[in-house]
Image (tube, rainbow, N blue to C red):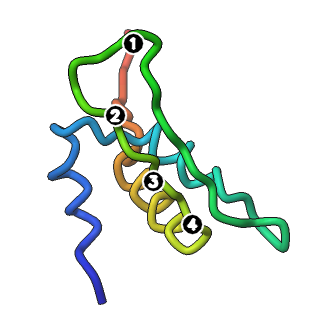
Amino acid sequence: MGTPVETWSEVVPLGVSANPSDALSRLPGTGPESGNAEMRIDWTWISPQPGISAVTVTPGIAPILEAGSVFLRGTPEEETIQAV
């Protein structure tokens, strides 16, 4: 059925985090007006590295990115404090 959601933890050292995953999941939109969204990063100065190709986010991959974002965000840590 696919890779387990825990796989998202393995890509965290590569820069994947909850906020960009959440933002990317929203790019295609929802409902009848949804469609492919293309994102390209261009540097403002000449970079010695080759250009980065565009990333296309389709409506079909948006739920996967959203699930990854929820997983990476996790549950907030709560601690009980007792003041005397």
Q: Name the residue under label 2.
A: 51
Q: Mark 1 points at which residue?
A: 83
Q: Name the residue under label 3.
A: 70
Instruction: Please name the amino acid that badge 1 sits on.
Output: Ala
CA gap, disc 3 and disc 4: 19 Å
Q: Residue 36 lies in what quarter of the image?
A: bottom right
First of labels 4, 2 by sequence position:
2
Q: Residue 17 lies in what quarter of the image?
A: top left
First of labels 1, 2 by sequence position:
2
Q: Position of residue 68 (x, y in %)?
A: 39, 57
Nearer to us in this view, 9 or 84: 9
Asked if labels 3 and 2 touch by Cβ distance under 8 angstroms, the answer is no
Question: In the rendered image of this protein, does residue 78 appear above or below residue 36?
Answer: above
First of labels 1, 4 by sequence position:
4
Instruction: Please name the amino acid that badge 4 sits on.
Output: Thr
Classify mark 2: helix, strand or loop: loop
Q: Position of residue 62 (x, y in %)?
A: 55, 63
Classify mark 3: helix, strand or loop: helix
First of labels 2, 3 by sequence position:
2
Q: Position of residue 63 (x, y in %)?
A: 53, 67
Q: Mark 4 points at which residue?
A: 58
Instruction: Please name the amino acid that badge 2 sits on.
Output: Gly
